[in-house]
Image (cartoon, rainbow, N blue to C red):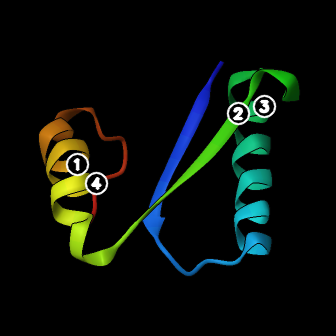
Amino acid sequence: MPHVIVKLWHGKSEHQKGRLTETITNGVMETLGYGEDAVSVGFEEVAPADWTAEVYEPDIAGKWTTLTKQPG
């Protein structure tokens, strides 16, 4: 705990995802005080045509008041 899920369009390299995983893990450890063994990070790739229905509506618009960083 905690588990971070990153939803993004297809096309980012494994290297880019690895660097982002490192950045997220280090941020969680430094900010929340967890050890590296407590942090997990996952990626869910979503096609651009499916973004609105699969991500924007349920996870962004549907949870707007819980977002700590809103788009736009």
Residue 40 is labelled as 2
Depth order, front residue of 46/24 = 46
- Dot 2 amino acid type: Ser
Whole-number angstrom distance, CA of label 2 to CA of label 1:
21 Å
Residue 60 is labelled as 1
- Dot 1 amino acid type: Ile
Q: Give the crowd class for mark 1: few <14, some 14-19, many >=20 residues within 10 Å.
A: some
Question: Percent x, y for residue 39?
Answer: 74, 29
Q: Secondary structure at mark 2?
A: strand
Whole-number angstrom distance, CA of label 4 to CA of label 3:
23 Å
In the picture shown, does residue 23 fall above or below 31?
below
Asked if disc 1 and disc 3 are in contact, CB closer than 8 Å, the reply is no
Mark 1 vs 3, N-terminal side: 3
Q: Give the crowd class for mark 4: few <14, some 14-19, many >=20 residues within 10 Å.
A: few
Mark 2 vs 4, N-terminal side: 2
In the picture shown, does residue 46 fall above or below 4?
below
